[in-house]
Amino acid sequence: MSESPQDSFEDLSIIGSCCSSECNCFKRIQLLENEKEQMNKTMENILLKIDSVEKTNSSLNVKLLELTSELEKLNKKNEKKVHFVNLKNSINFSKPNKFIRFDEGKIKYQQVEGQEDKSTICNATLPFCDLRGTLSLCCDFTLFYFEITMIMEEIKSNQLYYAIIDIKKSSGRIFLCNKEKVNWRTKYKIFEKFSWEDKDVFGCGVVLPPKNDSITLPYVFFTKNGSKIVDKITLETKQELLPEFLLLNCSFEPNFGNNLVAKPFLYNVHEHTI
């Protein structure tokens, strides 16, 4: 029996619907593949850009290292030579002083019975400028340096104690005192003050210009336990640069570098630059 036209049309309708679905699926698959391809291309571009940035960074790092190296070379060229002179020196005891005594290398402050405590001064034996005149250092800066180890003495409660390290008749000095309200001043200047503890090491260096330099003035710097605390104080003169010490109720042990093998400085004098 032959199919009715109605049945045939229904079948055609189903077939047409299936074809339409297959077509839509194909389009969706094609669209997804296109999107995937586009994403791959985008990812490739991103990777290329990352690679380019990394190469640029690498190139910049190389350039930075080159510039840093060049800068270090320029700095070394600009650094002025400093020649450390190991001056054999000592404390001058030619003038009697009842408030201090020499005790196994230490300069000891001592109280005098029946008298009030009094600050007292002692000097080094040799000034720095005397030896400089005999040196054949026409092109180098000259460095003289010494250190002192501070010694705390037994004192009464609230008793004042302090020390001063300076270059005589100059503005190059520091005041070592633990009292907040106590300062050391002249008519024109209050000097820098530093606190200290027993066994703290303070250093003083004087840098003199070359013999053929009549313009540059010498300067003094100070250190504490091997590190700079005062970088540069210009001195008004090149004459009689004599280390000087003032004490009240405390003592110190000087180190003029007379035996640097047995007793080296804390500050590295050979690394000092202008």
Image: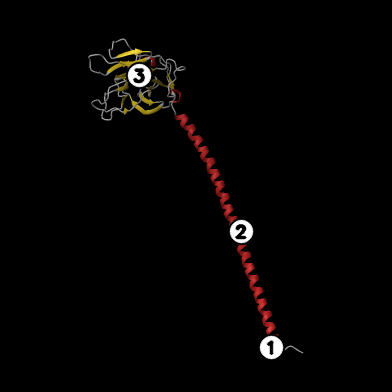
Amino acid type of disc 3?
Phe
Does label 3 or label 1 sit earlier along the sequence? 1
Quarter holding the N terminus is bottom right
The residue that mark 1 highlights is: 6
The residue that mark 3 highlights is: 252
- Residue 72 image offset from top left, x and y in percent: 48, 33
Q: Judge whether residue 139 can be spotted in this image.
A: no
Quarter residue 153 falls in? top left
Instruction: Please state which of residues 30 and 67 is positioned toward the viewer in this rendering.
Output: 30
Amino acid type of disc 1?
Gln
Q: CA distance from mark 3 to mark 2?
A: 79 Å
Does label 3 or label 2 sit earlier along the sequence? 2
Decide: marks 2, 1 in contact (CB < 8 A)?
no
Label 3's element?
A: strand
Q: Is residue 32 above or below residue 243?
A: below
Q: Judge whether residue 228 can be spotted in this image.
A: yes
Instruction: Please state which of residues 196 and 5 is positioned toward the viewer in this rendering.
Output: 196
Instruction: Please state which of residues 63 and 212 is positioned toward the viewer in this rendering.
Output: 63
Label 1's element?
A: helix
Instruction: Write the residue at 63% across / 73% down.
Output: 24
| Image depth: mark 2 or mark 1 in front | 1
User: Dot 1: within a 10 Å radius of its alpha carbon, few (fewer than 14), some, or many (20 or more) residues?
Assistant: few
- Residue 121 image offset from top left, x and y in percent: 29, 17
